[in-house]
Image: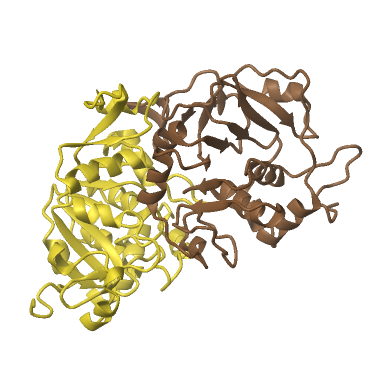
Chain colours: A brown, B yellow
């Protein structure tokens, strides 16, 4: 049964939905007074930035790939580059502008997609298999190769937590520079001393399972469950996804 | 002053100006304000061996791959976006070798376009360190000649034969403006040899004279334009219309007739018939 808090009762388990877990934990990387960016193909970070605006008491600047700066969209769009994300913006900060800002060190937090992530926080968004004889041609370079090394912090997400997405060795290194954070349906990782370390795990998932489903080495010592969503985080997410359509479309689960 | 209407052409005539083998950069981004009426007309006219240069193509490059029109591409990130994920016919074209790809980051492609726009052979670009893209593309690093000791990657100039953009408004002389974000259209139009334009509507020059700072491309840079209301369909053209998701669903149906049905359902098809 879904309660008002968006969590389900099932014995001691909380059943914090994988969708809510990902959006909320991406939002928790947003910090006060910073410049934060979300890009194309990035529904989760878009929702996270919009959630942070509603759920947290601090100010931050949210730039999105549609050129909006602190927009007030009437509803979250399906496409995370939709010009709806310029609604009520007071300026248009276009593609050249936000890339240049990042290049000169002015982007505090960038959300960047990845198909594969390794333990050093490098990413592959190019290809599965050999680049010249691809098994799967992926979307490609995008923001990563330039933004990951130049943003002050970059954070990524994967809806599939498995040894084929979180890997010891990338099929191709599209972008290097060390992701500061990684959020999956079951865990949050943070970069420390050049390695992605398990920071917390979904309350319904054993840390040993996280390690087992991760291709790079995971230290589970002294790692606790992720703090549950606050009322304001839950309220903000249900305001952004009132019909649950984003959650259904994301089709993400713990296992 | 240029006499009115000299640059206005029918869609078919505008596309007839594009020879087989041309390279072109296409305005907009993913599902938003792409010159899709021109893209479909390239297919109808059976163009061959085109090169597509764009930071974030999606529907446009997918359609050109599906129809066998594009054989070369320089791209940053390619997807249908939204809930659709990968662009299926683009993906297949790369995997089978039908499309020869030069993979970029969006900002390295912009750097190459900037080199052309600035009249230089190459353009420095920040970041890139640790990526395998330089090895793939033969990019090199140079040391700061002024002695800081810094090293910077330099991207060779990219000079498309055409920039083709979709705009909200055009004057009879060919001045263009867009509403909302210009995406990469500004640098695209400065980097290309020639600029072709599809506009939602034509307005009087006096409209533009009232707020000239809103003009994205002045008329002297524009070779020709056409007017196709709804031409960015199935994508959006802010604020005139949103993405038509049902039309994209129909486009993605993988049967023998869906491409023909899709082309016939386009806003320009009726005017053309």
Q: For residue A244, what is the image quadrant?
A: bottom right
Residue at horizontal 36 percent and vertical 24 percent from the top: B132
Q: Is there any visible trace of residue B41 in the rendered image?
A: yes
Left/right of residue B75 with respect to residue A9 in the rendered view? left
Left/right of residue B272 with respect to residue A29 in the rendered view? left
In front here: B156 or A98? A98
Left/right of residue A232 with respect to residue B169 in the rendered view? right
In front here: A212 or B32? B32
Q: Is B172 placed above or below A159 here?
A: below
| Image x and y of residue B228, in percent | 27, 73
In front here: B172 or B80? B172
Residue at horizontal 31 percent and vertical 69 percent from the top: B214
Residue at horizontal 78 percent and vertical 43 percent from the top: A16
Quarter placement of the C terminus of chain A: top right
Q: For residue A167, what is the image quadrant?
A: top right
| Image x and y of residue A5, in percent | 83, 52
Left/right of residue B241 with respect to residue B182 in the rendered view? right
Q: Is A205 placed above or below A57 here?
A: above
Total numbered labels: 0
Q: Is B154 placed above or below B264 here?
A: above
Q: Is there any visible trace of residue B159 in the rendered image?
A: no
Name the residue at the right extreme: A11
Q: Is B39 placed above or below A36 here?
A: below
| Image x and y of residue A215, in percent | 60, 20
| Image x and y of residue A238, in percent | 72, 58
């Amino acid at each position: 049964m879904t309660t008002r808090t968006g969590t389900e009762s099932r014995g001691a388990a909380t059943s914090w939905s994988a969708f809510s877990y990902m959006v909320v934990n991406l939002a928790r990387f947003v910090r006060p007074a910073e410049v934060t960016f979300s890009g194309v193909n990035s529904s989760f970070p878009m929702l996270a930035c919009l959630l942070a605006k509603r759920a947290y008491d601090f100010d931050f600047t949210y730039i999105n790939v549609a050129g909006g700066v602190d927009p007030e969209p009437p509803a979250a769009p399906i496409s995370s580059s939709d010009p709806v994300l310029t609604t009520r913006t007071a300026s248009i900060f276009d593609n050249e502008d936000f890339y240049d800002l990042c290049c000169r060190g002015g982007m505090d937090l960038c959300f960047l997609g990845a198909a594969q992530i390794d333990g050093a926080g490098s990413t592959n968004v190019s290809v599965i298999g050999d680049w010249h004889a691809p098994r799967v041609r992926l979307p490609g370079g995008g923001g990563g190769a330039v933004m990951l090394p130049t943003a002050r912090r970059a954070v990524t997400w994967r809806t599939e937590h498995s040894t084929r997405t979180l890997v010891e060795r990338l099929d191709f290194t599209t972008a290097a520079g060390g992701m500061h954070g990684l959020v999956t349906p079951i865990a949050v990782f943070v970069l420390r001393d050049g390695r992605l370390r398990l920071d917390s795990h979904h309350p319904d998932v054993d840390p040993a399972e996280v390690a087992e489903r991760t291709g790079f080495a995971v230290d589970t010592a002294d790692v606790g469950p992720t703090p549950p969503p606050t009322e304001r985080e839950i309220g903000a997410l249900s305001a952004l996804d009132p019909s649950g359509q984003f959650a259904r479309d994301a089709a993400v689960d713990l296992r | 002053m240029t006499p009115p209407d000299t640059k206005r052409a029918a869609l078919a005539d505008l596309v007839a100006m594009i020879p087989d083998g041309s390279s072109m950069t296409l305005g907009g981004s993913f599902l938003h304000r792409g010159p899709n009426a021109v893209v479909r007309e390239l297919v109808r006219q059976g163009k061959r061996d085109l090169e597509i240069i764009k930071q974030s193509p999606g529907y446009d490059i997918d359609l050109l791959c599906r129809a066998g029109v594009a054989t070369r591409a320089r791209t940053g990130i390619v997807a249908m976006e939204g809930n659709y994920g990968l662009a299926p016919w683009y993906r297949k074209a790369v995997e089978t070798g039908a499309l020869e790809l030069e993979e970029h980051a969006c900002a390295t492609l912009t750097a190459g376009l900037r080199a052309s726009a600035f009249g230089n052979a190459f353009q420095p670009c920040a970041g890139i360190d640790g990526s395998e893209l330089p090895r793939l593309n033969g990019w090199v690093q140079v040391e700061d000649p002024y002695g800081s000791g810094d090293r910077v990657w330099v991207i060779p100039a990219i000079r498309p034969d055409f920039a083709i953009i979709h705009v909200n408004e055009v004057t009879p002389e060919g001045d263009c403006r867009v509403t909302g974000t210009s995406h990469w259209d500004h640098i695209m139009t400065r980097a290309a040899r020639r600029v072709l334009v599809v506009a939602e509507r034509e307005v009087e020059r006096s409209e533009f004279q009232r707020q000239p700072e809103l003009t994205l491309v002045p008329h002297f840079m524009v070779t020709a334009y056409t007017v196709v209301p709804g031409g960015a369909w199935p994508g959006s053209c802010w604020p005139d219309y949103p993405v038509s998701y049902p039309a994209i669903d129909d486009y993605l149906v993988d049967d023998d007739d869906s491409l023909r049905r899709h082309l016939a359902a386009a806003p320009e098809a009726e005017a053309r018939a």
